[in-house]
């Protein structure tokens, strides 16, 4: 049984081509933790955990300390034993743990990462314009790029957001599906007022109206919304999925690999969402290529709508020597694709590094 020979943790910063706006912050860059694990048979696995301040209870510094502490304990242990230990540790720091769990799953050759035939997975695109006069031009530009699903951010001012959505609908003229995302920005009252006023034409869903743990507020919005509500930030594990399934008006649940903690756990969660009569959505718009590739591999066997694993398109630099392909609004995975990390790019964007080896642990 192969053992872990070496774990290298990389803390990196990837500047974005265009600032990415959500209700609670503006991203100028992504700062993920990247785990590199090599076993005694010479196989290497990679994982990524991007802790987004304001999105989770985790902090970047805390996640970095968590990964270093576990890496020191895991060096020298069998890959299977290490994976079991890390899965048990997920609740303490899910995003940080996911970097190590997914690296272990890749090193083990998890079958979800094997793509036997080329697959094209449609992606949504964020809608950036703020001036209503610019909306028609942006809609036309996104359609020309091949996108057919637009994500429109709301959650700051209910009345202004209602006007914004109507203007986007007018510009789209039925040519694109619209997803609305409040990123927890609304109060219960404002969320209900906004959701009840929506014209449902062309709108697929309304994502995460209120605070993550305010289940009552989100349920109240779902009860009056003219379109199905989707929960995202509220969802961390299977218990949250089960709870979402009991709320009338919640028709969608979105999962992210970094919150579920591992590939197999992600697949199981997506399947459970569908079994409960809801529609699963998958993807993280603030992850880089490693996580987006892994989510795409899971998506090909679990979802049938636009993926949100589009974060790889946002940074100026790519981490793969052969970058993920984007064609006509879709992420394209060639048959047999397995990424090679561009180590020069990794090192050029690295803020910190920590190495843990079996030999060093044995010498202590």
Image (tube, rainbow, N blue to C red):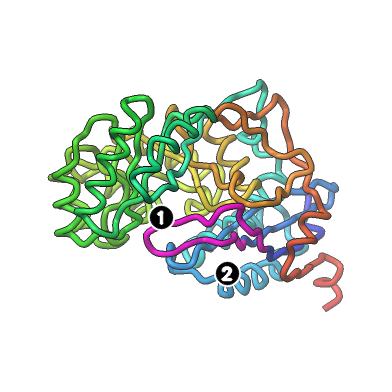
Q: Is residue 7 visible?
A: no
Q: Which residue is mark 2?
A: 63
Span colored in magenta: 13-31
* Residue extending furthest toward the bottom: 364
Q: Residue at x 52, y 61 (%)?
A: 27
Residue 68 x, y percent position in the rendering: 67, 71
**Mark closest to the chain's N terminus, 1 or 2:** 2
Label 1 to label 2, Cα distance in Å?
A: 16 Å
Q: Is residue 71 visible?
A: yes
**Which residue matches tag 1?**
236
Q: Left or right: where does residue 93 sit relative to residue 161?
A: right
Figure quadrant of residue 350: bottom right
- Name the foreground residue: 287 vs 267: 287
* The C terminus: image quadrant: bottom right
State how many labels appear. 2
Assess whether residue 22 is covered by the magenta stretch. Answer: yes
Residue 363: where, in percent of width, then height? 86, 75
Q: In the rendering, at what x and y percent does residue 37 appear?
A: 75, 55
Label 2 environment density (alpha carbons within 10 Å; few <14, some 14–19, many ≥20): many
What secondary structure predominates along the stretch shown in magenta?
Answer: strand
Residue 120 is left or right of residue 354, and the answer is: left
Q: Secondary structure at mark 1?
A: loop
Q: Position of residue 230 (x, y in %)?
A: 31, 44
Identity of the residue drawn at 65% across and 29% down = 333
Give the farthest residue toward the front.
133
Looking at the picture, tell me which residue is in the foreground, 314 or 90.
Answer: 314
Identified at 18% across, 59% down, the residue is: 188
- Is 338 one of the magenta-colored residues? no
| Dot 2: element | helix
């Amino acid at each position: 049984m192969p053992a872990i020979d070496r774990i290298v943790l990389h803390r990196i910063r990837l500047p974005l081509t265009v600032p990415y706006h959500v209700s609670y912050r503006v991203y100028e860059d992504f700062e993920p933790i990247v785990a590199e694990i090599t076993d005694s048979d010479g196989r290497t696995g990679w994982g990524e955990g991007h802790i987004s301040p304001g999105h989770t209870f985790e902090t970047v510094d805390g996640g970095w300390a968590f990964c270093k502490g576990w890496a020191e304990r895991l060096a020298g242990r069998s890959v299977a034993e290490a994976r079991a230990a890390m899965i048990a540790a997920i609740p303490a720091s899910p995003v940080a743990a996911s970097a190590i769990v997914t690296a272990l799953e890749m090193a083990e050759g998890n079958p979800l990462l094997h793509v036997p035939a080329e697959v094209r997975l449609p992606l949504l695109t964020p809608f950036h314009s703020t001036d209503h006069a610019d909306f028609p031009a942006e809609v036309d530009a996104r359609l020309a790029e091949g996108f057919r699903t637009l994500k429109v951010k709301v959650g700051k001012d209910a009345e202004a957001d209602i006007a914004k959505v109507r203007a986007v609908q007018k510009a789209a003229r039925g040519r694109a599906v619209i997803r609305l995302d409040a990123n927890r920005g609304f109060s219960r009252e404002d969320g209900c007022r906004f959701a009840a006023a929506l014209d449902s034409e062309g709108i697929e869903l309304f994502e995460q109206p209120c605070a993550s743990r305010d289940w009552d507020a989100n349920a109240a919005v779902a009860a009056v919304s003219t379109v199905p509500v989707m929960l995202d930030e509220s969802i961390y594990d299977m218990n949250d999925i089960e709870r979402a399934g009991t709320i009338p008006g919640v028709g969608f649940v979105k999962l992210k690999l970094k919150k579920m903690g591992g590939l197999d756990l992600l697949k199981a969660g997506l399947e459970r969402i569908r079994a409960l009569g809801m529609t699963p959505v998958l993807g993280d718009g603030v992850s880089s290529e490693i996580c987006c590739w892994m989510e795409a591999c899971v998506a090909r066997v679990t979802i049938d709508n636009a993926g949100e694993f589009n974060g790889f398109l946002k940074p100026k630099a790519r981490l793969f020597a052969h970058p993920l392909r984007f064609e006509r609004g879709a992420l394209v995975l060639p048959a047999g694709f397995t990424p090679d990390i561009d180590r020069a790019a990794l090192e050029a964007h690295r803020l910190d590094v920590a190495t843990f080896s079996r030999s060093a642990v044995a010498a202590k």
